[in-house]
Image (cartoon, rainbow, N blue to C red):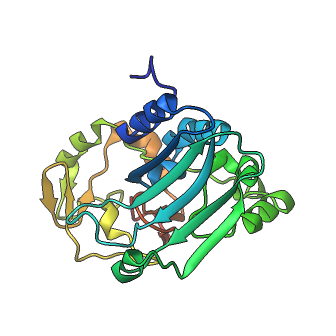
Amino acid sequence: LKKNFDSAYRLYDLSVVFLEKSLKILKTGIGCLSFLTTNKFISAEYGLKIRELLLRITEIKEILNISSLPIFKNTAAYPIILSCKKNNNIKNTVVIKNYDNIADFKQLHSKNLIKFPQNIIHSLPSFIIPLNSDANLINFLYANFKPLSIAIKDLNILYRPFGFIKWAENFKYMNKNKVSDKDIILLGTGNVGKYFINFNKRIKIAKVDKEISYFTYQPAYKEVWSKLSSEKLVFREISKELTFVYDPEFLLI
């Protein structure tokens, strides 16, 4: 797929490949497309190439943000409906409608409507498309203030420090009891709340269903441990809004 699709970038989701193929089929000037898909590609790293393509060859007419609605039961999915037209987009205005309940969505009545010029997205980091924020304000902030990565000299950003694909192999290092002072608490995505940890929620991933456990220290991960051995913010990877918790010590991962 990576040989035939530019959107097949990094740890991509198959939905972006279908979106790219659909855009290629559309006729310039008249072709329109509406896509029910996950919202993750509009901000995640893997979505960079498809965002570039959307901005380059389409007018993003409307995004219906239905990520708060119970569309897919028992699934951690945060969907949007993206509508675009394959056309020159110099003067296009993006309309984003956020829905908090089914009743408003059925009436297509959005209490939270956001509009901004599409060309503003070009000045945002990695062409991220904001769903719940004022794009003009974000653009102003980045134009006038330094990002944290520059303002904080010794800032380290770690993403999936134990690997991207084979991390499930590390479950053998889970232990209900703390063996040494170097052991850390292993969290699942669902355990990270907004400024708190839900210790009662079980870790359910890759056919594993366990209580929150300790990750016993492994010499093979000595470098990872050294990077984690300070105060940090732990961000929830899959979430409809920015969610993180503060770890004052070497406790969590």
Q: Indicate whether 112 appears above or below 5.
A: below
For the image, the number of numbered tags is 0
On the image, which quarter does residue 196 sit in?
Answer: bottom left
**x, y percent for residue 9:** 48, 31
Q: Is residue 207 left or right of residue 57?
A: left
Q: Indicate whether 122 appears above or below 29.
A: below
Q: Indicate whether 23 appears above or below 212.
A: above
Q: Work out whether residue 191 or residue 55 is closer to the camera in this orientation and state it.
A: 55
Q: Is residue 139 left or right of residue 9?
A: right
Residue at 38%, 53% in the rendered image: 36
Residue at 39%, 36% in the rendered image: 18
The quadrant of the image that shows the N terminus is top left
The quadrant of the image that shows the C terminus is bottom left
**x, y percent for residue 195:** 47, 77
Q: Work out whether residue 93 or residue 39 is closer to the camera in this orientation and state it.
A: 93
Q: Is residue 142 left or right of residue 7?
A: right
Residue at 61%, 61% in the rendered image: 130
Q: Indicate whether 217 appears above or below 199.
A: above
Q: Looking at the image, which residue sits at the far front?
A: 30
Q: Looking at the image, which residue sits at the far right?
A: 144
**Residue 9 in sight here:** no
Residue at 59%, 41% in the rendered image: 54
Q: Is residue 73 left or right of residue 137?
A: left
